[in-house]
Image (cartoon, rainbow, N blue to C red):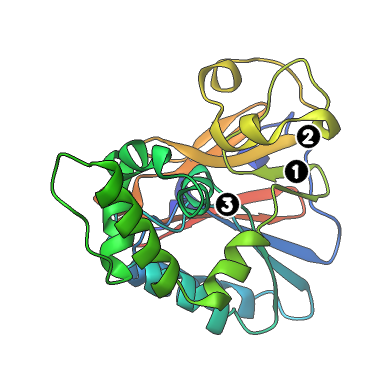
Amino acid sequence: MRSLSSFMRRSDQPDAKAKIPNGTVAYAIGDIHGRVDLLEELQAKIQEDARTQAGKRHVVVYLGDYVDRGLTSREVIDRLIEDPLPGFESVHLKGNHEDAMLKFLHDTDIAPGWLAYGGDATLYSYGVTVPRSPLTPDKLSTMQAEFARKLPGRHLEFLSALDLRHEEGDYFFVHAGVRPGRSLEEQSEEDLLWIRDAFLFSADDFGKIIVHGHTISPKPEFQPNRIGIDTGAFASGVLTCLVLDGTEQRILQTG
C-alpha cells in the first residue's frame, strides 16, 4: 500500500492549527498485535523519514496493543525492548490487551475473555500450552503458572512500566480515547484503555487533538478532535504511523 502522504491531511485544511513544538517530529504507531514483521518494516520507513529531518528531536509513541491476535507477540516485545529506534525518544503506552495479559497473571477469571480476543496467540508465542475446552479452574491455574514461569522478567518489567498517556504540543496520545465531559487530567485508566462509542461519536473539543488506536478503521480517521490510526494490522497487513511535524500531519504505512 502506498504511503498516505497523498491522502487528505488536517494541515491541508485552513482551520487546522494543531501543532507539534518547533524542532520536534513525533511519530505515533498504531496497534501492532503480534506482527513483528510489520513493526520492523514500519520502523525502517520511520528511520528513512527521520533522515530527512536531521537536527530535530524525534519521538516515537507506540499506542499499545503490542500483543494478542498475531503469532509473534513475544518477538514484538523483544524488539521494543532490544531494538529501539536509534536517536529516538521512545514512549510505550499501555493497551487494553497488555492490561488483560498482566491481569491474567493474578486472576484466571479473565482468561476466557482474553483468550477469545487473541490471548491464545500470545500464549503460543511464549510456548505456553493452551488447554482445550472446557476451561476448568485446574486447567486455567496450570496455564497461568506456566505463563508466569515462561514470561521473561524483562518483559514483565516492560509491561508493568507502560504509560497511559503522552502529550506533545497540541496532541494527546492514548490507546483508546478519552471520556467526554472530563478534563484530560481527570481521565480514568478504564476509559483510556477501553472507551469506544462515547468518545468516537463525540464532537467535543477535548482541548488537544486525541491520537489513538484501539478501534479499527480501513484507513486513518482524521476528525476535528481526534485521529485514529488502528488499521487492523494483524489481519490487514497495514500498520500505520502518524507523523506530526509543525502543523503538518502525514501517514506512513506498511505494504
Q: Position of residue 2 (x, y in %)?
A: 35, 57
Give me the C-alpha separation between circle 2 and circle 1.
5 Å
**Amino acid residing under circle 3:** Leu
Identify the secondary structure beneath mark 3: loop
Which of the marked residues, 2 or 1, is nearer the chain's N terminus?
1
Alpha carbons under labels 2 and 3: distance apart: 16 Å
Which residue is tagged 3?
63
Q: Label 2 crowding class (10 Å Cα cut-off): few <14, some 14-19, many 20+?
A: some
Q: Earlier in the sequence, mark 1 or mark 3?
A: 3
Q: Is residue 59 above or below residue 18?
A: below
Residue at image x 39%, y 44%?
A: 231
Instruction: Give the x, y percent position of residue 204.
Output: 72, 16
> Circle 2 sits in a helix, a strand or a loop, which is it?
loop
- Would you name the residue on which mark 2 appears? 208
Q: Residue at x 83, y 48 (%)?
A: 169
Q: Nearer the viewer, mark 1 or mark 3?
A: 3
Q: Return the residue nearer the eye: 62 or 103.
A: 103
- List x then y, in percent, for residue 144: 38, 57
Q: Quadrant of residue 135?
A: top left
| Residue 213 x/y as whole percent | 52, 42
Sequence-first tag of 2 and 3: 3
Q: Amino acid at mark 2?
A: Lys
Mark 3 neighbour density, 10 Å: few (under 14) some (14–19) many (20 or more): many
Residue 118 placement, left or right of 109 = left
Identity, as a three-letter code, of the amino acid under mark 1? Tyr
The answer to whether residue 197 shows anywhere in this view is: yes
User: Could you give the CA–CA distance between mark 1 and mark 3, rounded to whole angstroms?
Assistant: 13 Å
Q: Determine whether the residue tagged by mark 1 lies in a helix, strand or loop.
A: strand
Residue highlighted by disc 1: 171
Q: Are marks 2 and 1 in contact (CB under 8 Å)?
A: yes
Near-viewer residue (75 or 57)? 75
Residue 255 in sight from this viewpoint? no
